[in-house]
Image (cartoon, rainbow, N blue to C red):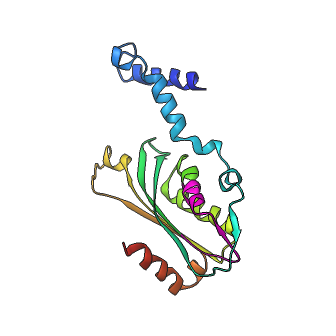
Amino acid sequence: MTEHLANHYRQIIEGLGEDPEREGLRDTPKRAAKAMQFLNHGYQQSLEEIVNGAVFASETDEMVLVKDIELYSMCEHHLLPFIGKCHIAYLPRGKVLGLSKFARIVDMYARRMQIQENLTRQIAEAVQQVTEARGVAVVVEARHLCMMMRGVEKQNSSMTSSVMLGAFREHQSTRQEFLTLVQGR
């Protein structure tokens, strides 16, 4: 697989008018192929594998919030990175998820080519599926290199997307509590 991808990178380098045999580029196709595989390794993972049974019985029924989970993803339109952070809250219903699993869920979906809006929904639905919570809220804030390095070249732009499920969607006060906690840095 790596060699197959490396050949494509070699063709891209040649297509840009460069010599892939030049000293600085000689190993670039292989390095680029390995980097692309790493940046997209979320395709090789599943939710069950990531969670690995780390769901625990709990009487907690108040909001649980995990803030500032860093993420790195690839825009499916230009194959350029977007970089940001994710905030996840849920209202447990008899069980809680191990803390590190939130970051692992974010990483699994972020390490796939996609748009930020879909990433936000995938994270929310995964947390809902695993916890069976009364509600799940996810906000993703990111800066997109496809908007910063090309096209309109707006360096200070960022995008915020949110998905509210269950009680967070149905109850304004619950949604507002979450948004206030996220903004209260």
Residue 141, by quadrant, is bottom left
Q: Position of residue 123 (x, y in %)?
A: 58, 60
- In the picture shown, does residue 43 fall above or below 62? above
Residue 25 in view? yes
Q: Position of residue 59 (x, y in %)?
A: 68, 80
Q: As drawn, is 159 to the left or to the right of 41?
A: left
Residue under the image location 39 percent in, 12 percent down: 21
Residue under the image location 54 percent in, 41 percent down: 40
Q: Which one is in front, 56 or 137?
A: 56
Image quadrant where one finds the C terminus: bottom left
Q: Position of residue 54 (x, y in %)?
A: 68, 60
Image quadrant where one finds the N terminus: top right
- In the picture shown, does residue 134 fall above or below 3? below
- What is the tally of numbered marks visible in this picture? 0
Q: As drawn, is 57 to the left or to the right of 76?
A: right
Please tell me whether residue 161 belongs to the stretch shown in magenta. no
Q: Position of residue 7 (x, y in %)?
A: 52, 20
In magenta, the rendered stretch is 89-106
Q: Which one is in front, 53 or 119?
A: 53
Residue 182, by quadrant, is bottom left
Residue 164 in view? no
